[in-house]
Amino acid sequence: MLFRKTTRKRFIFLVAAFMLMMGFNTYSYVMRFHKTETEKRDILNEKAFKLFFLRTRTSADCARFLVQNEKRFMDYSSEIVREAFIYQNNLYIHFASPSELMLNDGNRDIDLLYDLFNIKRVSDNFFLNPRDTGYEVNAKANYFDHNGVWLSDDILRVRHKGLRQDLLDIADMIRQGLSGKRLEIYNSIKTTIIDNIKRIPLQENYEPNPYLSRVENIVPMNFLYILTNIREDNSTDIMDLRESVRYEGDSSIKTVRSYVDIPSRYKDNLLYHDMEIYPRYIPVHAPELLKPRWNWLLYEDIYINSDFMDYIEKLHFKGNYMFSYEKSHIIEDRVKKINDDIYSNHIFFYLTDMSVGIAFPFMISLFAFIHLKTEISFLLMFKNRIRELLFIFWLMPVFLMLIVKGGILTGYLIYLNSLGYGTSTYIVFSLLMTFMLASIAFYPINRWCFSQFIGEKINLYALHKGR
C-alpha cells in the first residue's frame, strides 16, 4: 500500500488546511474587489461630479471671465455650457425647439444637463406640436420642481412667488430701451408668460441628485428668448406684435415659432451674459475629470484631473465661487478613499496569496519527501520515473490552487450575473498573475525538496530504508 494510514490522514489534513487558507484569502479578495469596484463604478457614473457652476458678478465680470479662462478650461478637457445658467438658485436651461431638432442631432453638453436634472422627458414634451412645421408653435407654460419633494405647501408657495419676482426682474432687464406702444405690448406679453407659469411637481418617489440639491426650480430659458425676440423684432407692426404671444386654456403659450429659438445676438456668445443678473453661475462641463486608470499591479483605480480641481479651487478663492462648493471636497475625499481601498486590497492579496501559494506547496512537497521517500525509492528501483514523479508533486499543489481560485471566481461571477450585477473582468488578471508567479516560484523549490533523487549519485537502497 503506497500510503500508510497515518500518512494519508496527515496528507489529507495538510491539503485541507492549504485549500481552506487559500480559499479564505481568495474569497476575501473577491468580495472586497466587488465592493470597491461597485463604489468605483458609482463615482465614475455620477454625472454631477462632471459639472461645476462658477459665479460671475456682473456682465463685465462675466465677459472678462470668458476671455481669461475659456482657453484654460479647454486645456483641462473641459468647456463652458452656453445654454444654461443659475440665477437665485433656479436653473435656466435651453429646451430645443422643433426647428433646432431638425437642424441638430443633439448637443452632448445640453443632453448631460437634461440627464443630470432628470428633465429629458419633460424637455422632449415641452413643445406640444413638434412635428408641425407651421408658423406658430405651442409651448407648455411650466417650470419644474427640482428639490421640493419634502417641502410643505407654504414653502412651495413662497418659492413660486420668489420665482415670479425673479422672472419680472429679468424681464425688466431685457426690455431696456423700449418705449411707447412697443413697451406696452412687451409688458402685456411679460404678464401673459409670468402670470400663467405653473409648477410641475416631482415624480412620485423621485428624489433629486444630492450633489445638485441646492437647485430649487428649473425654468425653460425659452421664455426669456420670447421676451428678447419680442424686444428686438422691429419688422412686425404693432397689431401683429400684440398677437404674437397668446395664453391658451390648456396651460400652454402659443407664439411665433422663431420667438422660442435662441436670439441671433446670443448664437455665438454665452447666453445673457450682458444682463446684470446677480448672482449668476455658469456651468462648466469636465467630462474627463474622473476616469479609470490602469496600475502596474494589474488593477484599475480612479484617475482624477487634479490640475482642473486645483484651477477651479483657485477661481473659487478669487471670487468665482462654486455653487455647491462642498461637492469638490466630496469628490476628492471619495476618490482618495476608493483608491486607498483598491490599493490595500490588492497589496494584501498579493502578499498573502504569494506567501500561501509558495509555503503550502513547499510543505506538501516536503511532506511527500519525508513520509513517502521509502515508497518513491522502491518505485525508482524498478523503473526510472523521477521526472514524472517530480512533475506530479509540482502539479498537484498547482492544480489545487487552480481549483480553489477558479471555483471561487466562477461562483462569484455566476452569482453576480444571476443578480443582474455587472462586474469587471480585470479580477481575473490579478488572480492569474499570483497563480502563475506562485507556480513558477514553486518549481525550483519542488526540485530542491527532492534533490536527493536527482543528484549525480543516488543511493536508492539507503533512501528506501529511510536513511
Image: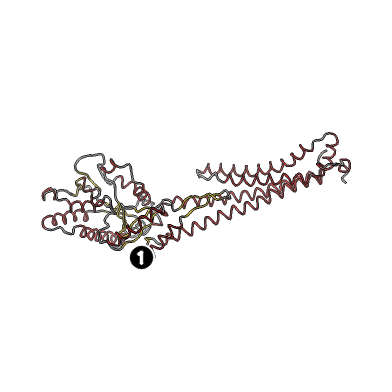
Quarter of the view holding residue 391: top right
Residue at position x 57%, y 46% in the image: 427
Q: Could you say where residue 450 lies in the image, as x and y percent from the top left? A: 79, 44
Q: Foreground residue, 21 or 290?
A: 290
Residue at position x 68%, y 48% in the image: 357
Residue at position x 37%, y 49% in the image: 112
Q: Could you say where residue 153 lies in the image, as x and y percent from the top left? A: 31, 59
Q: Could you say where residue 420 lies in the image, as x and y percent from the top left? A: 50, 43
Q: Foreground residue, 196 or 19?
A: 19
Left or right of residue 245: residue 206: right
Asked if residue 452 is positioned above or below residue 198 in the image, the reply reads above
- Element at badge 1? loop
Left or right of residue 363: residue 427: left
Left or right of residue 403: residue 222: left
Specify the farthest residue to the top: 383
Quarter of the view holding residue 331: bottom left
Mark 1: few/some/many CA within 10 Å (<14, 14-19, 20+) = few
Q: Could you say where residue 176 lies in the image, as x and y percent from the top left? A: 18, 59
Asked if residue 218 is positioned above or below residue 395 in the image, the reply reads below
Residue type, mark 1 in image: Gly
Q: Foreground residue, 315 or 92?
A: 315
- The residue that label 1 is drawn on is 319
